[in-house]
Image (cartoon, grey):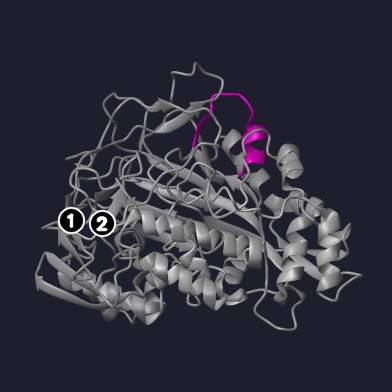
Amino acid sequence: MKHSRLKWLAPVTALALALTIGGCGGSDDNNSTSGSAGASQTSGGDTTATTAGDGDTAQATEAAGTDSGDSGTTAGAAKAGGTLRVGTSLNPTQIGYTPEAAANGVIFIMRMAFNSLLFYDNDGNLIGQLAESWETDPAAKTLTFHLRSGVQFSDGTDFNAEAVKWNIEQYQSVQRTEVAAVASVDTPDETTVVINLSEWNSAALVSIGFFVYYMSPTAFEANGGADWARNNPVGTGPFVLKSFEQTVSASYTKNPNYWEGEPYVDQIDFTFFADPTVMTSALKAGEVDMITNVQVEQVYQLGDGDWVKTTNTNGMGLESVGLIPSSKDESDPFYKAENRLAMCYAIDNETLVAAFGHGLLSTTNQWAAPSAVTYNPNVVGCPYNPDKAKELLAEAGNPDGFDTTIYASAILGDWTTALADQLSAVGINATIEMMDATQQSAQMSDGWSGLTWHFASISPDLGLYMGRHLDPNGAFYAPGIQHPQDAVDLLNEIRAATDDETKIALEWELQSLIYDKYALFGKVLYVGQNYAVKAPYVMDDNWTVPHASAWTPQTVWLDK
């Protein structure tokens, strides 16, 4: 039985992590440069090429209750066998039709059975996964991917250039913004894919390379299409679905023919928890080996002990959390920018973070961490000012305020109650309505009325990450908000930029427009972190380490 580490992921001793997130910047790559795919944001105009290189598997961890040097990940020989039991607050409605994977959390589950062309190493640099190398040419408006030879889907059919083209067309059929710039796809041979863009898009390399996941065309077409595929994932990934019961569990067995070698564990079982307290209790009781997508409140409550806590430290996929108003319908009070701005001025997020963040959260006032190149220090961002909020409400014709609804999950119940109190102080009377993960996902894709929680990946590329919300066809929250033409025009200018200086200047301009003029995405409350907490014998899972929505199930092993 052969067990091989990924060629692009070599084991090293883990790094210790202090549980702070204030300095997480990171940088997405849209300029493939030889030897370091994360060197800059955009292509400088010349044709550039990158070959997939080696990364490291240093996992950012804190071993609570142990010496700081004890990271919970070792450089010793990995052991094969066993079942990893994962408790998670994720609740996917489908796990197999990848073009409908519209929530970042689902990507964790999708990574069991599916791969993408590109991935990230632990420093946030783009590396190859199904693609061995790639080239970008802004002048020709093309991306060229050179695929690995000999890769097969779990049904035994070949992964090749035609499969890539077919999958991109599937994403286009549901109007995913990740492939909106694709004009056509050429397949000159079995391992070469040339993507022709309608216009140069600086975000295209990452959006196509990392956010498109590859299904077997043969299995899809032989079994009835999307309806069958939603619950029957067939990809090139390290695991194969054994069972799936929505809202309850999913179980996967290892793919013995995985292209980079047989995974270490025999099986990975997911249990979906609606209640975070029940989930943490399951970890304490030994019913699961690790829990994921853990909020800071649960991290704090777990306290010291033998648990190992992991999170992202390279800034890739870093998420902001805030409150976003619906603004699409003219009958909605939040249709008027003055009412949206009033809502933002009414919220004292610094006090809330101090009360609920347990020292694990930081704040921002825009679509960026303060250390990111996309952070505009000139953005005002509606600091707490209830008098200003009341003035704006009066200007909007609502001197006595108005009624609305705040939707919230159980995890954020205390935050939501405090927010409702702050809003009511200026006349915005919010009724709290609880929702589960399925309802929250539906709001992201279908819209809502009132206020809901806004989760946004704030990696430093607004063309890609803000674009997935601001674009009229965006995958997240877009159906519930306005799309001001000047903001959309700026977004498209950012995407068309061919040098970093121009792109960053445009991104700063867009930050000001969105947060100071329109308050389109409402109030950013804090920069969040997605934690996993695990038993010390769970090794090399890399949960969120390469990217806040990714892990490496093929490398995880159990030291017991």
The x, y position of residue 261, in whole percent, is 20, 45
- Circles 1 and 2: CB distance less than 8 Å? yes
Please give the name of the residue rendered at 83% of the width and 68% of the height, measured from the top-left corner.
393
To which residue does mark 2 refer?
Answer: 44
- The secondary element bearing badge 2 is classed as loop
Which amino acid lies under the numbered mark 2 shown in the image of this protein?
Answer: Gly
Which tag is nearer the camera, tag 1 or tag 2? 2
**The stretch drawn in magenta includes residue 215:** no
Please give the name of the residue rendered at 74% of the width and 78% of the height, measured from the top-left corner.
332
Which label belongs to residue 28?
Answer: none
The x, y position of residue 218, in whole percent, is 23, 75
63 in relation to 434, above or below? above
- The secondary element bearing badge 1 is classed as strand
In the picture provided, is 445 more to the left or to the right than 192? right
Quick one: quadrant of the N terminus? top left
Report crowding for label 2: few under 14, some 14 to 19, many 20 or more residues within 10 A (C-alpha).
some
Between 73 and 376, the one nearer to me in the picture:
376
Report crowding for label 1: few under 14, some 14 to 19, many 20 or more residues within 10 A (C-alpha).
some
The x, y position of residue 519, in whole percent, is 66, 64
- Residue 70 seen anywhere in this rendered image of the structure: yes
Furthest-right residue in view? 400
Between 268 and 520, the one nearer to me in the picture:
520
- The residue range painted magenta reads 295-310
Which amino acid lies under the numbered mark 1 shown in the image of this protein?
Answer: Thr
Q: How many marks?
A: 2
Please give the name of the residue rendered at 29% of the width and 68% of the height, measured from the top-left corner.
215
Please give the name of the residue rendered at 61% of the width and 24% of the height, measured from the top-left corner.
304
The x, y position of residue 483, in whole percent, is 56, 76
- Residue 111 seen anywhere in this rendered image of the structure: no
Between 32 and 307, the one nearer to me in the picture:
32
Which label belongs to residue 48?
Answer: 1
